[in-house]
Amino acid sequence: MHSIRAATPADIPLILDLIRALATYEREPNAVKTTEADLLRDGFGPHPCFECLIAENIDGRDPEAAGFALYFYNYSTWRGRSGIHLEDLFVLPRFRGRGSI
């Protein structure tokens, strides 16, 4: 069973680990330049640039991170706030193929 929740500042180390896992999956393990300080400032500061959701496997005793989605809002000069841009959606390999998260 899975749950999805909004990330908090306490999740920053986890978010960075998942970003690095995504980079490794994409065969670019050294491409990640983002730091925990960047994520704190840009995602949880006074003017957040992104939002993040954490998918968790809740089959066991303690929830275990299964993946993440990082997104930000689009803005249209004609329509105003018009939707979201999904920057990254990543599920750790061991949680894939189980249906929906």
Image (cartoon, grey):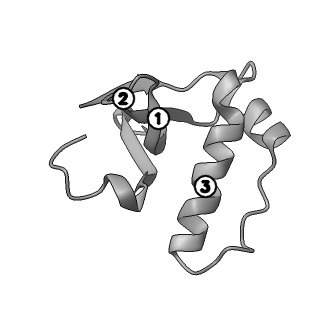
Residue 29 - label: none
Q: Earlier in the sequence, mark 3 or mark 1?
A: 3
Looking at the rendering, which quadrant does residue 45 occupy? top right
For marks 1 and 2, give the CA distance.
Answer: 8 Å
Looking at the rendering, which quadrant does residue 19 occupy? bottom right
Which quadrant, please, contains the N terminus?
A: top left
Pointer 2 residue = 60
User: Picture coordinates of residue 16 (x, y %)?
Assistant: 68, 47
Looking at the image, which residue is at 41% across and 49% down? Answer: 86
Residue type indicated by callout 2: Gly
Question: Furthest-bottom residue in view?
Answer: 27
For marks 3 and 1, give the CA distance.
Answer: 16 Å
Q: Is residue 83 left or right of residue 67?
A: left
For marks 2 and 3, give the CA distance.
Answer: 24 Å
Residue 19 - label: 3
Looking at the image, which residue is at 18% across and 44% down? Answer: 100
Residue type indicated by callout 3: Ile
User: Picture coordinates of residue 20 (x, y %)?
Assistant: 64, 60
Residue 9 seen: yes
- Crowding at dot 3, Cα within 10 Å, few <14 / some 14-19 / many 20+, comes out as many
User: Picture coordinates of residue 33 (x, y %)?
Assistant: 79, 61
User: Picture coordinates of residue 40 (x, y %)?
Assistant: 76, 31
Looking at the image, which residue is at 59% across and 72% down? Answer: 24
